[in-house]
Image (cartoon, grey):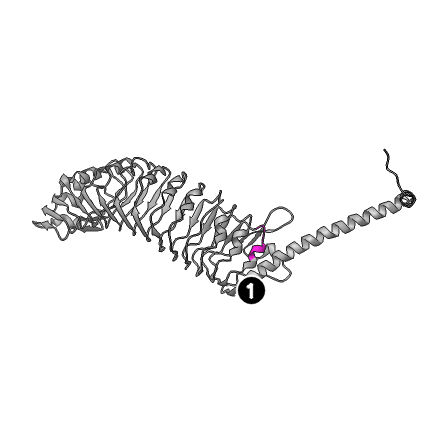
């Protein structure tokens, strides 16, 4: 059924239809004008918000000795201010603020969160103090948050643990305290560096949920408790650095499941038990193994000889016993530090095998239980050797003259042993 109209409605419709085309065109242009003016005003407001956010950041800077912010202000468009980068497409919004290594002092303004298109903040190597604004974690496009080497205090913002956009967070070398926040819903975070702060509490179990992580740097804090087994769930991580904390307990064999590891740093903690025997068999990419200054006991795993890419092994200052395994298969080995344990020579087969390690530069076996005589094959060690320390052992016999074939030696320490005889005059041939 067709709709019925009142007499008044029919008169209004007739009046509208009687308007000339010229009048209709004028009305249309007016509508377009007001609409365009509203959009332009919206854009202008957005630009002014970003400009004011940057000026608020500048007002928080108390000292700018190199005048890096001298261009901030006036009639110059903020996209041309020093350290500010805007997007390449219209409308132009701030996507990066990089003022690294500028010697700036002051505090971080929370109004920087009004730069809603921001993708990168790099204020590293300055002198900013105060707290990190919680609002930074709410920026939906922020990928890189770089604030290392400042004087920041307070806690790591909880909001960072729920960001869906962050791929790198670097807050290293500050004075941050409190606990590390839990990490949830973070699907793209790759690098987390909270090292060299004053953080306490445990390593969050939730870190194991961030499967995108490739590097975790938490060394030089006050973290305690065990190393979470959940970290073994991160299949693409290449760096796990937890040294110089107060971590305790055993190292779980589940860490051997992280076959992508290149660097494993656990030095200077209170870790106990034996070193997992699987460590060499299941970490084929491992280059740097640092587990010194703990309370490890038992044997050095012979499986280390299978980690063919190892370049640095530091197991010093533990309670390891037994013979040193043959490591001659490690052709890239450069540093072997086993000082201050209770290791034995067992015929010095380990030293003979090291003659295959042509990149070896440092060998430290001091303060162990090495006995017997040093074999003459010591002279076949790498000519790249710079330092040999066999001091404070139970070595007997004479100093092999062949050791002085290693002409690039800068240090040869063999004191506090049971050596006899005379020092060969060819010692003068060393460079």
Q: Nearer the viewer, residue 94 or 282?
A: 282
Percent x, y of residue 114:
59, 55
Q: Which residue is mark 1?
A: 59
Q: Is residue 371 left or right of residue 325?
A: left
Q: 168 above or below 72? A: above
Residue pictured at 51% horizontal, 60% vertical: 108
145 within the magenta span: no
Secondary structure under tag 1 reads helix
Q: What is the number of callouts on the image?
A: 1
Taking the image as shown, residue 31 lies to the left or right of residue 298, namely right
- Nearer the observer, 41 or 335: 41
Alpha-carbon neighbours of circle 1 within 10 Å: few (<14), some, or many (≥20)? few
Q: Position of residue 304 (x, y in %)?
A: 27, 38
Say whether residue 213 is visible. no
Vertical placement of 240 versus 278: above or below? below
Quarter residue 198 falls in: bottom left
Specify whether 301 is left or right of 76: left
Which segment did they paint magenta?
112-117
Q: Which residue ends up furthest to the top in the rendered image? A: 1
Quarter of the image that includes the N terminus: top right
The location of residue 324, given as percent across then percent down, is 20, 41
Q: Residue at x 45, y 57 (%)?
A: 155
Counting from the top left corner in percent of width and height, residue 298 is at: 21, 43
On the question of residue 428 being in view, the answer is: yes
């Amino acid at each position: 059924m067709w709709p019925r109209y009142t007499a008044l409605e029919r008169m209004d419709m007739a009046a509208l239809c009687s308007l000339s085309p010229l009048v209709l065109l004028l009305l249309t242009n007016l509508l377009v004008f007001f609409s365009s003016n509203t959009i332009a005003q919206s854009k202008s407001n957005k630009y002014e918000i970003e400009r004011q956010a940057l000026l608020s950041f500048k007002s928080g800077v108390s000292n700018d000795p190199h005048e890096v912010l001298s261009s901030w202000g006036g009639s110059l468009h903020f996209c041309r201010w020093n350290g500010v980068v805007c997007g390449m497409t219209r409308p132009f919004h701030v996507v990066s603020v990089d003022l690294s290594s500028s010697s700036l002092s002051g505090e971080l303004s929370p109004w920087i969160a009004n730069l809603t298109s921001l993708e990168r903040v790099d204020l590293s190597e300055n002198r900013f103090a105060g707290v990190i604004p919680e609002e930074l974690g709410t920026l939906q496009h922020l990928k890189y948050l770089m604030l290392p080497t400042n004087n920041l205090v307070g806690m790591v913002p909880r909001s960072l643990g729920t960001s869906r956009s962050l791929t790198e967070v670097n807050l290293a070398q500050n004075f941050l305290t409190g606990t590390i926040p839990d990490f949830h819903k973070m699907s793209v975070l790759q690098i987390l560096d909270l090292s060299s702060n004053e953080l306490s509490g445990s390593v969050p179990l939730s870190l194991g949920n961030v499967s995108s992580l490739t590097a975790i740097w938490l060394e030089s804090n006050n973290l305690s408790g065990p190393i979470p087994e959940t970290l073994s769930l991160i299949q693409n991580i290449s760096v796990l650095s937890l040294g110089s904390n107060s971590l305790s307990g055993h190292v779980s064999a589940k860490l051997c499941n992280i076959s992508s590891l290149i660097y494993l740093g656990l030095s200077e903690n209170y870790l106990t038990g034996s070193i997992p025997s699987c460590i060499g068999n299941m970490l084929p990419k491992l280059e740097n193994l640092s587990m010194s200054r703990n309370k490890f006991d038992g044997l050095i795993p012979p499986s280390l000889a299978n980690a063919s890419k190892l370049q640095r092994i530091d197991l010093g200052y533990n309670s390891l016993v037994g013979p040193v395994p043959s490591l001659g298969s490690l052709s890239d080995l450069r540093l072997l530090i086993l000082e201050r344990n209770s290791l034995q020579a067992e015929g010095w087969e380990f030293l003979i095998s090291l003659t295959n390690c042509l990149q070896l530069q440092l060998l430290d076996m001091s303060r162990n239980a090495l006995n017997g005589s040093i074999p003459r094959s010591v002279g076949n060690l790498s000519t790249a050797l710079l330092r040999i320390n066999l001091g404070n052992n139970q070595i007997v016999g004479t100093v092999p003259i062949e050791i002085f074939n290693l002409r690039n030696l800068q240090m040869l320490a063999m004191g506090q042993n049971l050596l006899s005889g005379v020092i060969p005059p060819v010692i003068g041939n060393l460079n």
